[in-house]
Image (cartoon, grey):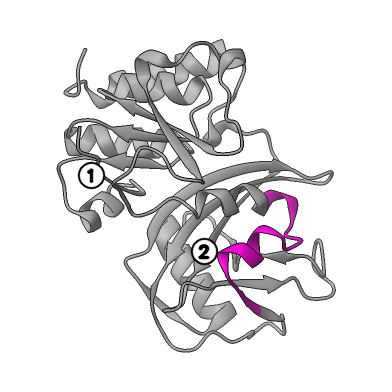
Amino acid sequence: MGPAASTSTVTALYSKRAVEFGEPLSRDIPSPLVHVVAAAVIDTTGRVLIAQRPAGTHLAGGWEFPGGKLEPGEERLAGLARELREELGITIATPRPLIRVRHSYPSREVLLDIWVVKRYGGEPRGLDGQALRWCTQDELAVTELLPADKPIVAALRLPERLTRVSTRYYSIRDFSSIGNPAEVSHETRLLGVICASAEDGVAAEATGADFLVMRDALPVRVLATLCDSLPVPVFASGIGLEQAWALGASGLNEIRA
Protein backbone atom coordinates (compact mmCIF):
# COMPACT_ATOMS: atom_id res chain seq x y z
CA MET A 1 0.00 0.00 0.00
CA GLY A 2 1.17 3.55 -0.74
CA PRO A 3 0.60 7.04 0.60
CA ALA A 4 -3.13 6.84 0.00
CA ALA A 5 -3.60 4.16 2.65
CA SER A 6 -6.67 4.55 4.82
CA THR A 7 -6.46 5.97 8.32
CA SER A 8 -7.80 2.68 9.68
CA THR A 9 -4.86 0.88 8.05
CA VAL A 10 -2.37 3.24 9.70
CA THR A 11 -4.00 2.81 13.11
CA ALA A 12 -4.06 -0.98 12.73
CA LEU A 13 -0.40 -1.08 11.74
CA TYR A 14 0.57 1.00 14.76
CA SER A 15 -1.40 -1.27 17.05
CA LYS A 16 0.33 -4.30 15.53
CA ARG A 17 3.74 -2.62 15.93
CA ALA A 18 3.01 -1.93 19.60
CA VAL A 19 2.26 -5.59 20.25
CA GLU A 20 5.33 -6.82 18.34
CA PHE A 21 7.76 -4.54 20.16
CA GLY A 22 6.09 -4.73 23.56
CA GLU A 23 5.30 -1.01 23.68
CA PRO A 24 1.87 0.31 24.68
CA LEU A 25 0.15 3.04 22.72
CA SER A 26 0.46 6.42 24.40
CA ARG A 27 -3.28 6.41 25.08
CA ASP A 28 -2.97 3.00 26.81
CA ILE A 29 -0.27 3.89 29.33
CA PRO A 30 -1.12 2.27 32.67
CA SER A 31 -2.59 4.61 35.30
CA PRO A 32 -1.90 6.81 37.08
CA LEU A 33 -1.11 8.70 33.87
CA VAL A 34 -0.60 12.45 34.06
CA HIS A 35 -1.07 14.01 30.61
CA VAL A 36 0.86 17.27 30.58
CA VAL A 37 0.85 19.91 27.85
CA ALA A 38 3.93 22.12 27.88
CA ALA A 39 5.76 24.53 25.62
CA ALA A 40 9.19 25.65 24.62
CA VAL A 41 8.44 29.38 24.51
CA ILE A 42 11.05 31.01 22.27
CA ASP A 43 11.74 34.75 22.06
CA THR A 44 12.87 36.79 19.05
CA THR A 45 16.55 36.12 19.81
CA GLY A 46 16.04 32.33 19.89
CA ARG A 47 16.23 31.92 23.66
CA VAL A 48 14.04 29.29 25.33
CA LEU A 49 12.05 29.89 28.51
CA ILE A 50 12.18 27.42 31.40
CA ALA A 51 10.49 27.58 34.79
CA GLN A 52 11.42 26.32 38.26
CA ARG A 53 8.81 24.27 40.06
CA PRO A 54 7.72 26.17 43.20
CA ALA A 55 7.94 24.89 46.76
CA GLY A 56 5.21 22.50 47.80
CA THR A 57 4.76 20.95 44.36
CA HIS A 58 5.88 17.58 43.00
CA LEU A 59 9.63 17.76 42.18
CA ALA A 60 9.89 21.25 43.68
CA GLY A 61 13.00 23.18 42.65
CA GLY A 62 13.42 21.35 39.34
CA TRP A 63 13.59 23.24 36.06
CA GLU A 64 11.12 22.38 33.31
CA PHE A 65 9.28 23.68 30.28
CA PRO A 66 6.20 25.63 31.41
CA GLY A 67 2.81 23.95 31.21
CA GLY A 68 0.58 21.69 33.22
CA LYS A 69 -2.01 18.92 33.37
CA LEU A 70 -4.89 18.66 30.97
CA GLU A 71 -8.30 18.90 32.55
CA PRO A 72 -10.77 16.02 31.95
CA GLY A 73 -12.13 16.23 28.40
CA GLU A 74 -9.96 19.23 27.51
CA GLU A 75 -8.44 19.48 24.03
CA ARG A 76 -4.64 19.62 23.92
CA LEU A 77 -4.33 23.07 22.35
CA ALA A 78 -7.01 24.53 24.60
CA GLY A 79 -5.16 23.14 27.60
CA LEU A 80 -1.84 24.51 26.40
CA ALA A 81 -3.32 27.98 25.88
CA ARG A 82 -4.96 27.89 29.31
CA GLU A 83 -1.83 26.72 31.14
CA LEU A 84 0.43 29.35 29.57
CA ARG A 85 -2.14 32.06 30.26
CA GLU A 86 -2.50 30.99 33.91
CA GLU A 87 1.21 30.37 34.54
CA LEU A 88 2.89 33.04 32.42
CA GLY A 89 0.19 35.55 31.52
CA ILE A 90 0.70 35.15 27.77
CA THR A 91 -1.64 34.37 24.89
CA ILE A 92 -0.36 32.09 22.13
CA ALA A 93 -0.87 31.74 18.38
CA THR A 94 -0.03 28.93 15.91
CA PRO A 95 1.97 26.64 18.23
CA ARG A 96 4.14 24.04 16.51
CA PRO A 97 3.80 20.37 17.57
CA LEU A 98 7.17 18.95 18.56
CA ILE A 99 7.28 15.65 20.44
CA ARG A 100 5.50 13.51 23.03
CA VAL A 101 7.67 12.01 25.76
CA ARG A 102 6.64 9.32 28.24
CA HIS A 103 8.53 9.16 31.53
CA SER A 104 8.06 7.10 34.69
CA TYR A 105 8.61 8.71 38.08
CA PRO A 106 8.32 6.59 41.25
CA SER A 107 4.85 7.94 42.00
CA ARG A 108 3.40 8.54 38.55
CA GLU A 109 3.62 8.08 34.80
CA VAL A 110 3.89 11.30 32.80
CA LEU A 111 3.05 11.89 29.14
CA LEU A 112 4.60 15.20 28.09
CA ASP A 113 2.94 16.77 25.07
CA ILE A 114 5.43 19.40 23.89
CA TRP A 115 4.82 22.35 21.56
CA VAL A 116 7.02 25.18 20.32
CA VAL A 117 5.59 28.67 20.82
CA LYS A 118 7.21 31.56 18.98
CA ARG A 119 4.17 33.76 18.51
CA TYR A 120 2.67 35.05 21.73
CA GLY A 121 1.27 38.19 23.27
CA GLY A 122 2.39 39.61 26.60
CA GLU A 123 5.58 39.34 28.61
CA PRO A 124 6.05 36.01 30.41
CA ARG A 125 5.83 36.33 34.21
CA GLY A 126 5.88 33.71 36.96
CA LEU A 127 2.25 34.07 38.07
CA ASP A 128 2.49 30.99 40.33
CA GLY A 129 5.56 32.35 42.11
CA GLN A 130 7.91 30.26 39.99
CA ALA A 131 11.30 31.53 38.89
CA LEU A 132 11.78 31.93 35.13
CA ARG A 133 14.96 31.73 33.09
CA TRP A 134 15.76 32.40 29.44
CA CYS A 135 18.40 30.06 27.98
CA THR A 136 20.21 29.81 24.69
CA GLN A 137 20.08 26.40 23.03
CA ASP A 138 23.63 25.71 24.22
CA GLU A 139 22.80 26.77 27.80
CA LEU A 140 19.67 24.61 27.72
CA ALA A 141 21.77 21.57 26.79
CA VAL A 142 23.74 21.82 30.07
CA THR A 143 20.89 22.92 32.35
CA GLU A 144 19.68 20.48 35.02
CA LEU A 145 16.17 19.93 33.69
CA LEU A 146 13.73 17.39 35.10
CA PRO A 147 14.45 13.92 33.63
CA ALA A 148 11.24 13.86 31.60
CA ASP A 149 12.24 17.10 29.82
CA LYS A 150 15.71 16.10 28.63
CA PRO A 151 14.72 14.42 25.32
CA ILE A 152 12.95 17.63 24.36
CA VAL A 153 16.23 19.56 24.21
CA ALA A 154 17.54 17.45 21.33
CA ALA A 155 14.25 17.70 19.44
CA LEU A 156 14.38 21.49 19.67
CA ARG A 157 17.43 21.41 17.39
CA LEU A 158 15.23 20.25 14.52
CA PRO A 159 14.26 23.12 12.18
CA GLU A 160 10.75 23.92 11.00
CA ARG A 161 11.86 23.31 7.41
CA LEU A 162 14.25 20.47 6.63
CA THR A 163 16.61 21.46 3.81
CA ARG A 164 19.68 19.33 4.64
CA VAL A 165 20.15 15.59 5.15
CA SER A 166 22.81 16.04 7.79
CA THR A 167 23.88 18.61 10.40
CA ARG A 168 25.77 18.40 13.67
CA TYR A 169 22.44 17.68 15.40
CA TYR A 170 20.77 15.13 13.12
CA SER A 171 21.27 12.83 10.15
CA ILE A 172 18.65 11.43 7.77
CA ARG A 173 18.66 7.99 6.16
CA ASP A 174 16.43 6.24 3.67
CA PHE A 175 13.86 3.78 4.96
CA SER A 176 15.49 0.94 3.00
CA SER A 177 18.65 1.29 5.11
CA ILE A 178 16.87 0.69 8.41
CA GLY A 179 17.13 -2.79 9.92
CA ASN A 180 15.85 -4.11 13.23
CA PRO A 181 15.89 -1.99 16.42
CA ALA A 182 19.10 -3.56 17.74
CA GLU A 183 21.00 -2.49 14.61
CA VAL A 184 20.00 1.19 14.67
CA SER A 185 22.88 3.46 15.66
CA HIS A 186 22.09 7.05 16.59
CA GLU A 187 25.70 8.09 17.20
CA THR A 188 25.37 11.45 18.99
CA ARG A 189 22.74 12.86 16.63
CA LEU A 190 19.05 12.39 16.11
CA LEU A 191 18.15 9.88 13.42
CA GLY A 192 15.59 10.83 10.77
CA VAL A 193 14.17 8.38 8.24
CA ILE A 194 12.78 9.21 4.81
CA CYS A 195 9.48 7.39 4.31
CA ALA A 196 7.41 6.88 1.16
CA SER A 197 4.18 6.05 2.99
CA ALA A 198 2.46 6.17 6.35
CA GLU A 199 3.14 2.45 6.76
CA ASP A 200 6.87 3.13 6.29
CA GLY A 201 6.59 5.79 8.97
CA VAL A 202 5.04 3.39 11.47
CA ALA A 203 7.76 0.81 10.77
CA ALA A 204 10.57 3.39 10.94
CA GLU A 205 9.42 4.66 14.34
CA ALA A 206 9.25 1.05 15.55
CA THR A 207 12.89 0.52 14.59
CA GLY A 208 14.11 3.58 16.48
CA ALA A 209 13.75 6.62 14.22
CA ASP A 210 13.80 9.87 16.20
CA PHE A 211 11.81 11.69 13.52
CA LEU A 212 10.10 10.90 10.23
CA VAL A 213 10.60 12.65 6.89
CA MET A 214 7.75 12.05 4.44
CA ARG A 215 9.08 11.88 0.88
CA ASP A 216 5.72 12.58 -0.77
CA ALA A 217 2.49 14.32 0.16
CA LEU A 218 -0.01 12.24 2.16
CA PRO A 219 -3.77 12.68 2.19
CA VAL A 220 -4.53 15.05 5.04
CA ARG A 221 -6.52 12.49 7.05
CA VAL A 222 -3.72 9.94 6.77
CA LEU A 223 -1.10 12.51 7.80
CA ALA A 224 -3.21 13.60 10.77
CA THR A 225 -3.69 9.99 11.89
CA LEU A 226 0.02 9.25 11.56
CA CYS A 227 0.98 12.32 13.60
CA ASP A 228 -1.62 11.52 16.25
CA SER A 229 -0.51 7.88 16.50
CA LEU A 230 3.25 8.36 16.84
CA PRO A 231 5.16 10.34 19.48
CA VAL A 232 8.06 11.44 17.25
CA PRO A 233 8.21 14.58 15.06
CA VAL A 234 6.88 14.16 11.52
CA PHE A 235 7.97 16.36 8.59
CA ALA A 236 5.31 16.56 5.90
CA SER A 237 5.59 17.25 2.17
CA GLY A 238 3.48 19.15 -0.32
CA ILE A 239 1.50 21.39 2.06
CA GLY A 240 1.93 24.72 3.80
CA LEU A 241 3.76 25.05 7.10
CA GLU A 242 0.81 26.16 9.23
CA GLN A 243 -1.40 23.48 7.66
CA ALA A 244 1.24 20.92 8.60
CA TRP A 245 1.18 22.15 12.20
CA ALA A 246 -2.61 22.02 12.28
CA LEU A 247 -2.49 18.37 11.17
CA GLY A 248 0.08 17.51 13.87
CA ALA A 249 3.31 17.59 11.83
CA SER A 250 6.32 19.36 13.29
CA GLY A 251 7.50 20.86 10.02
CA LEU A 252 8.10 20.43 6.32
CA ASN A 253 10.45 18.30 4.27
CA GLU A 254 12.06 20.61 1.71
CA ILE A 255 15.08 18.45 0.94
CA ARG A 256 15.70 18.36 -2.79
CA ALA A 257 16.92 15.05 -4.23
Quadrant for the C terminus in the image: top left
Residue 15 located left or right of residue 163: right
Q: Kindly identify the residue that appears in the image at 56 percent across and 81 percent down.
A: 88
Residue type of the residue flagged with mark 1: Glu
Q: Nearer the viewer, mark 1 or mark 2?
A: 1
Regarding mark 1 in the picture, which secondary structure is present there? loop
Q: Kindly identify the residue that appears in the image at 82 percent across and 46 percent down.
A: 107
In the rendered image, which residue does mark 2 sit on?
Answer: 39
Q: Position of residue 87 (x, y in %)?
A: 59, 78
Q: Which residues are magenta?
A: 133-148
The vertical placement of 245 against 234, above or below, is below
The vertical placement of 9 against 64, above or below, is above
Q: Position of residue 217 (x, y in %)?
A: 17, 34
The vertical placement of 257 against 248, above or below, is above
Q: Which mark is residue 51?
A: none
Q: Position of residue 81 (x, y in %)?
A: 44, 70
Which quadrant of the structure image shows residue 167? top left
The vertical placement of 13 against 113, above or below, is above
Q: Which mark is residue 254?
A: 1
Give the mark nearer the N terminus: 1 vs 2.
2
Viewer-proximal residue among 201 and 137 = 137
Q: Position of residue 104 (x, y in %)?
A: 74, 41
Say if the magenta span includes residue 228.
no
Numbered marks: total: 2
* Residue neighbourhood size for the residue with mark 1, other residues' Cα within 10 Å, grouped as few (<14), some (14–19), many (≥20): some
Regarding mark 2 in the picture, which secondary structure is present there? strand
Distance between mark 1 and mark 2 Cα atoms:
25 Å
Which quadrant of the structure image shows residue 140? bottom right
Viewer-proximal residue among 11 and 214 = 214
Viewer-proximal residue among 164 and 15 = 164
Residue 142 located left or right of residue 72: right
Q: Kindly identify the residue that appears in the image at 47 percent across and 54 percent down.
A: 73
